Image (cartoon, rainbow, N blue to C red):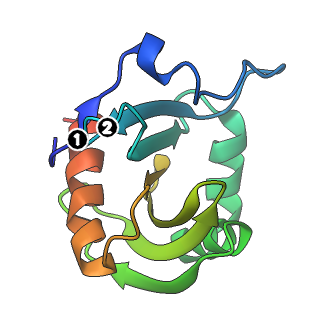
Amino acid sequence: MAGYQLMTDQEAAPYATPAANPATRYKRWYYDSSPDGEPDGVLTIDAVEWDPELAAEKRRDSLTQELRNFFAGAKAREVTSFPAGPMGGRLSCGYTNTDHGEATVCAWSDAATFGFLTLADAAPLDDAAPIAVTFRTAAERRS
């Protein structure tokens, strides 16, 4: 997908957060785009279907406020809005610092989901947004 390949559970295990108690709210997948074996993309999705906390947040906050809260928590810079693609809602991307250096992060929100894609390289935001839409569209196949 967009030059990224899903890492197996075994390949991703060193990067995955140890099982939390209680279990984490999000579902997370790791992707590699180069032969180095390190994840170059991390896709994280939460849905009201399995998360009552997200459902409560969506009743309380607007989509704009959800994204504002996320990017403030990520200490993101140059946050810019982009078309959200066929799934609708809102999409924004920005730059943030991680333990491995600067990264690009795109986040989206709609009535039923919240998700974000972190790209290890600091891709230009105009390039990262369509990659995020591609990941989102593939992951959130809804009828």
Among the 4 quarters of the image, the one containing residue 46: top right
Query: What residue is rendered at 43% in x and 18% in y?
Result: 11
Q: Position of residue 14 (x, y in %)?
A: 58, 23
Q: Is residue 45 left or right of residue 25?
A: left
**Which kind of residue does numbered mark 1 sit on?**
Tyr
- Nearer to us in this view, 111 or 86: 86
Residue found farthest to the top: 10
Query: What residue is rendered at 67% in x and 29% in y?
Result: 17
Q: Position of residue 3 (x, y in %)?
A: 15, 46
Q: Is residue 141 left or right of residue 78?
A: left
Among the 4 quarters of the image, the one containing residue 101: bottom right
Query: What residue is rendered at 19% in x and 35% in y?
Result: 143
**Which kind of residue does numbered mark 2 sit on?**
Asp
Q: Position of residue 105 (x, y in %)?
A: 47, 64
- Nearer to us in this view, 132 or 55: 132
Query: What residue is rendered at 31% in x and 78% in y?
Result: 124
> Can I make out residue 77 in this image?
yes
Q: Is residue 76 left or right of residue 128?
A: right
In what quadrant of the picture does the N terminus appear?
top left
Q: Position of residue 48 (x, y in %)?
A: 55, 38
